[in-house]
């Protein structure tokens, strides 16, 4: 089912892309920082967007993440890197909906099953607030990871928890992240 949704979205995007005229270009940037005395993470995503009909933005994306730890004298760190594609639709300079797909190369395995598989897919569907200012567009929203892969490096960022009503213990964590992105127009 997930593959069918992805293939349909890509086919729709390519069909639209072949018939539409590019009206502008944008560079998008989002980031993440988390640090403590025993380690941390920083990450950024870079997007190149082609604007169609003033509302639809489609293009490739690149993601980089660095994680390090210094726990009881043991030091280590690793990089996660990958690329993908995104499509955002903006409605009346107020809201947006989007789909973002990435294939990320990760040197770590969070589960014992198939530790040799280093490429991790993510497919985020979501939306939120979108507003254009003089020299930048701000997109702030929430995204649901449809694939929710066991080795996804985004798992630490999932923030919606479902708790048992009687014990108060976390039963499940929903694969939802929040993301704030800045898009800078090129050549306006």
Image (tube, grey):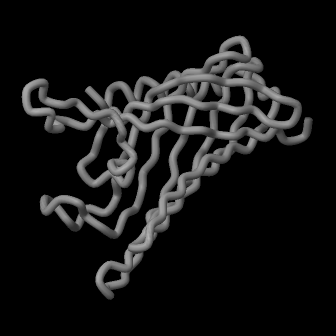
Q: Is residue 67 above or below residue 148?
A: below
Specify the quadrant of the image occupied by residue 76: bottom left
Q: Is residue 8 above or below residue 168?
A: above
Q: Nearer the viewer, residue 186 or 111?
A: 111
**Residue 78 in view (yes/no):** no
Quarter of the image with the N terminus in it: top left
User: Which residue is farthest front?
Assistant: 167
User: Which residue is farthest bottom?
Assistant: 73
> Is 62 placed left or right of 3 in the picture?
right
Percent across and percent down for residue 106 are 37, 64
Q: Nearer the viewer, residue 176 or 148?
A: 176
Percent across and percent down for residue 163 are 18, 31
Residue under the point 56% across and 26% down: 13
Percent across and percent down for residue 158 are 35, 41
> Is 118 placed left or right of 24 in the picture?
left
Specify the quadrant of the image occupied by residue 146: top left
Q: How many marks?
A: 0
Q: Nearer the viewer, residue 104 or 39?
A: 39
> Is 65 placed left or right of 49 in the picture?
left
Residue under the point 18% across and 38% down: 170
User: Which residue is farthest left?
Assistant: 166
Quarter of the image with the C terminus in it: top right
Specify the quadrant of the image occupied by residue 109: bottom left
User: Which residue is farthest right?
Assistant: 188
Q: Is residue 187 above or below residue 125?
A: below
Residue under the point 63% across and 39% down: 181
Percent across and percent down for residue 172 are 19, 35
**Residue 115 in view (yes/no):** yes
Residue under the point 54% across and 41% down: 85
């Amino acid at each position: 089912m997930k593959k069918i949704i992805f293939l349909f979205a890509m086919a729709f995007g390519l069909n639209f892309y072949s018939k539409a005229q590019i009206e502008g270009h944008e560079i998008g940037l989002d980031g993440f920082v988390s640090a403590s005395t025993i380690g941390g993470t920083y990450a950024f995503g870079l997007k190149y967007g082609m604007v169609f009909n003033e509302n639809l933005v489609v293009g490739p994306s690149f993601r980089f993440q660095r994680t390090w730890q210094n726990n009881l004298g043991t030091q280590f760190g690793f990089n996660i890197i990958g690329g993908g594609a995104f499509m955002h639709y903006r409605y009346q300079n107020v809201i947006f909906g989007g789909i973002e797909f990435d294939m990320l190369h990760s040197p770590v395995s969070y589960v014992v099953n198939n530790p040799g598989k280093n490429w991790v897919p993510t497919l985020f569907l979501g939306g939120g607030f979108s507003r254009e200012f003089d020299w930048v567009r701000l997109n702030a929203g929430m995204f649901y990871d449809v694939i929710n892969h066991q080795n996804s490096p985004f798992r630490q960022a999932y923030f919606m928890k479902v708790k048992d009503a009687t014990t108060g213990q976390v039963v499940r964590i929903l694969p939802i992240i929040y993301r704030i992105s800045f898009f800078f127009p090129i050549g306006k």
